[in-house]
């Protein structure tokens, strides 16, 4: 650095810049690694990454996109606070004001709304990617648990945010959604009153949801997110993609994080930001009339991401549809990495060639079986009529549940006997089946349920006028 | 804090450790209790939750169903002149159930639960009849206490109040 000594005294701006990044970004690999090691912010990345783990078609950048959406949601959320009052009816009037009388208000609200919805989709896709590549296996079990916890928190953030515009859509979706809580055994009624702050959705509920939405949930998500990134490093970086026949590469090619990974991330984030901005300019976030507690719209639907759950409620006693089945599913997702252990197929999409075929088979069966079961239950099966003396918890809950679980068990033993499927392929098969079924239920709930929650074709949907 | 065998007496260190754990646990429970108590719903006078007067006995003809929106209930008058105050909230998932005059029953728009004029389930998924409020008649005036929600499994004639 001989040149530096001969230069005149640096200006105040140069000195400030030098204090932040001492000699600019170093031009050699060693210096760049040092920089990552020394910087708190860049600590979320390892100093070096394996070239193959950056393959675009392996991760699809889903985790990074989720992080980007979190940042956008944080920024737009903070500025929306300046124009919003969590009171009845001021909340609704404020939204109208934001949409019509605030500079870029509608754009900011649209961006917040669509990013929140996209975040759910992206989080679920991220979970699927990690699942089908077996990337949650030891030593990454803990990060899987954190990820699933964050997914639940993202749903919580979306659900609490859903009420804030205080329109008809919000009011009834939250009424239906929170009533599910009252079916929690023993403490259900008490819990519902606590969450709502009263006997029904009202001003207290709005305040409760607002406080959860802007403080508690984002705070926890931020903490978990930081931990999630740090654990990726601790667990030895991302898993590395492999084809099923490939063996472990003894000496994988590695490059420094700066510039190779950071540049990619930056371009990816820019492209997505541009796409989101464009979308938010073109498509307005929905807003209906002001909430009217005396009139439920027909049909009254939960937020779209809970429509699969609402569809289950149409077929089962609420204790089974809203508590038993979701609890089992959540426990199942949490415990996956503790019984699906084989480290050999980590990084292989769908475990193996047989795994790939079995996944296709499971998706195919679910595509046919789920709509058939919905139609059958809607028009033919009537358990409460056939078992009139039984408690509806059994006749409309546990018995139908047993009736649909039995074929699943049969399918499981069939793939064990005919395809010689091992544990990891069975897990894949059953999870693919259940997941596809859930997606189909969600689609039926969103597009095929009309007035009175009867089934209609989407192009034939009658519109109820009030 | 399990029983220690007689051969290994509890050392002072172990005792203090256990005592700290115990006290710490109690402190944690107390803190949780404070937060839960703090978050309990508060109710204001005169709102839904107090005693509401929907009208006089003669305002409601026999065989009629009248919605009282600010009290969140229906006044149902039976053919023989008795009264029921039926909460308008569906027992399934909390939607407001409108009275369908032509079908002569309550039909919930959310999940198509149906109830007869006494509020008894005619079509699931609702798990129990519509809830009731305590109704009294004083000097020909109806009084409905919306503070207590009465859950029921069936309709019984004892639920009907006669003037």
Image (cartoon, rainbow, N blue to C red):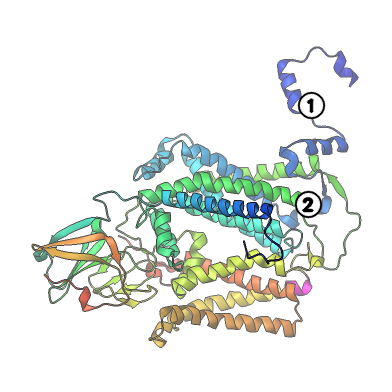
- Residue name at image x 26 percent, y 77 percent: B155
Residue A108 on the magenta segment? no
- Residue name at image x 64 percent, y 59 percent: A125
Q: Chain of mark 2?
A: A
Badge 1: how crowded within 10 Å, few (<14), some, or many (20+)? few
Residue at disc 2, secondary structure: loop
Q: Which residues are magenta?
A: A352-356
A111 vs A329: above or below: above
Question: In screen coordinates, is A246 left or right of A117?
Answer: right
Q: Chain of mark 1?
A: A
Sequence order check: which comes first, mark 2 or mark 1?
A: 1
- Residue A388 position within the rendered picture, expressed as x and y whole percent measured from the top left: 38, 86
Question: In screen coordinates, is A333 left or right of A306?
Answer: right
Numbered badge on residue A237? 2
Q: Quadrant of the C terminus of chain B?
A: bottom left
- Residue B29 position within the rendered picture, expressed as x and y whole percent measured from the top left: 51, 53
Report whether residue A118 is seen. Answer: no
Question: In screen coordinates, is A54 left or right of A457?
Answer: right
Q: Quadrant of the N terminus of chain B?
A: bottom right
A95 vs B63: above or below: above
Q: Provide the residue designation for mark 1.
A: A22
């Amino acid at each position: 650095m001989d040149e530096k000594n001969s230069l005149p005294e640096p200006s105040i701006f140069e000195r400030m810049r030098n204090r932040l990044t001492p000699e600019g970004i170093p031009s050699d690999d060693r210096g760049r690694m040092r920089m990552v090691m020394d910087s708190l912010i860049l600590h979320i990345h390892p100093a070096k990454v394996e070239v193959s783990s950056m393959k675009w078609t392996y991760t699809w950048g889903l985790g990074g996109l989720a992080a980007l959406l979190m940042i956008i949601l944080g920024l737009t959320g903070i500025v929306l606070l300046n124009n919003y009052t969590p009171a009845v009816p001021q909340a609704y009037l404020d939204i109208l004001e934001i949409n019509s009388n605030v500079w870029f208000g509608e754009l900011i609200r649209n961006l917040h709304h669509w990013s929140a919805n996209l975040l759910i989709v992206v989080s679920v896709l991220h979970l699927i990617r990690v699942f089908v590549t077996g990337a949650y296996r030891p030593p990454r079990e803990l990060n899987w648990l954190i990820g699933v916890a964050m997914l639940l928190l993202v749903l919580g953030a979306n659900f609490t945010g859903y009420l804030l515009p205080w329109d008809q859509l919000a009011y009834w979706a939250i009424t239906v959604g929170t009533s599910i809580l009252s079916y929690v055994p023993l403490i259900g009624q008490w819990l519902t009153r606590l969450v709502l702050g009263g006997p029904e959705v009202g001003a207290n509920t709005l305040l409760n949801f607002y406080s959860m939405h802007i403080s508690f949930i984002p705070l926890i998500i931020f903490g978990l997110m930081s931990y999630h990134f740090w654990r990726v490093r601790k667990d030895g970086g991302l898993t590395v993609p492999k084809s099923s026949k490939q063996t472990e590469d003894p000496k994988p090619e590695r490059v420094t994080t700066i510039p190779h990974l950071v540049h990619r991330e930056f371009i990816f984030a820019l492209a997505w930001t541009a796409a989101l901005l464009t979308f938010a300019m073109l498509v307005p976030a929905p807003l209906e009339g002001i909430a009217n507690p005396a009139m439920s719209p027909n049909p009254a639907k939960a937020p779209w991401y809970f429509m699969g759950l609402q569809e289950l409620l149409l077929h089962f006693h609420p204790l089974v549809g809203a508590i038993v089945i979701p609890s089992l599913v959540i426990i199942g997702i949490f415990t996956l990495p503790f019984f699906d252990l084989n480290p050999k197929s980590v990084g292989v999409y769908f475990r193996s060639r047989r795994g790939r075929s079995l996944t296709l088979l499971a998706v195919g069966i679910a595509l046919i079986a789920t709509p058939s079961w919905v139609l059958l239950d809607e028009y033919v099966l009537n358990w409460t009529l056939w078992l009139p003396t039984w408690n509806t918890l059994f006749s409309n809950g546990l018995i139908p549940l047993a009736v649909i679980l039995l074929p699943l068990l049969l399918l499981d033993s069939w793939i064990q006997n005919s395809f010689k499927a091992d544990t990891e392929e069975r897990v894949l098969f059953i999870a693919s089946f259940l997941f596809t079924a859930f997606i189909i239920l969600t689609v039926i709930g969103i597009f095929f349920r009309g007035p009175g929650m009867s089934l209609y074709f989407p192009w034939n949907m009658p519109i109820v006028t009030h | 804090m399990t029983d220690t065998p007689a051969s290994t007496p509890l050392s002072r260190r172990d005792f203090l450790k256990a005592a700290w754990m115990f006290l710490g646990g109690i402190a944690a429970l107390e803190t949780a209790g404070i937060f839960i108590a703090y978050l309990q719903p508060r109710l204001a006078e005169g709102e839904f939750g107090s005693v509401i007067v929907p009208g006089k006995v003669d305002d409601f003809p026999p065989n009629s169903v009248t919605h009282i929106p600010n009290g969140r209930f229906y006044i149902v008058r039976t053919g023989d002149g008795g009264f029921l105050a039926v909460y308008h909230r569906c027992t399934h998932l909390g939607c407001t159930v409108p009275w369908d005059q032509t079908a002569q029953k309550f039909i919930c728009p959310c999940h198509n639960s149906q109830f007869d004029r006494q509020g008894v389930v005619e079509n699931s998924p609702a798990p129990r009849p519509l809830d009731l409020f305590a109704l009294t008649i004083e000097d020909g005036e109806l009084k409905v206490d919306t503070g207590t929600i009465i859950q029921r499994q069936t309709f019984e004639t004892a639920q009907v109040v006669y003037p």
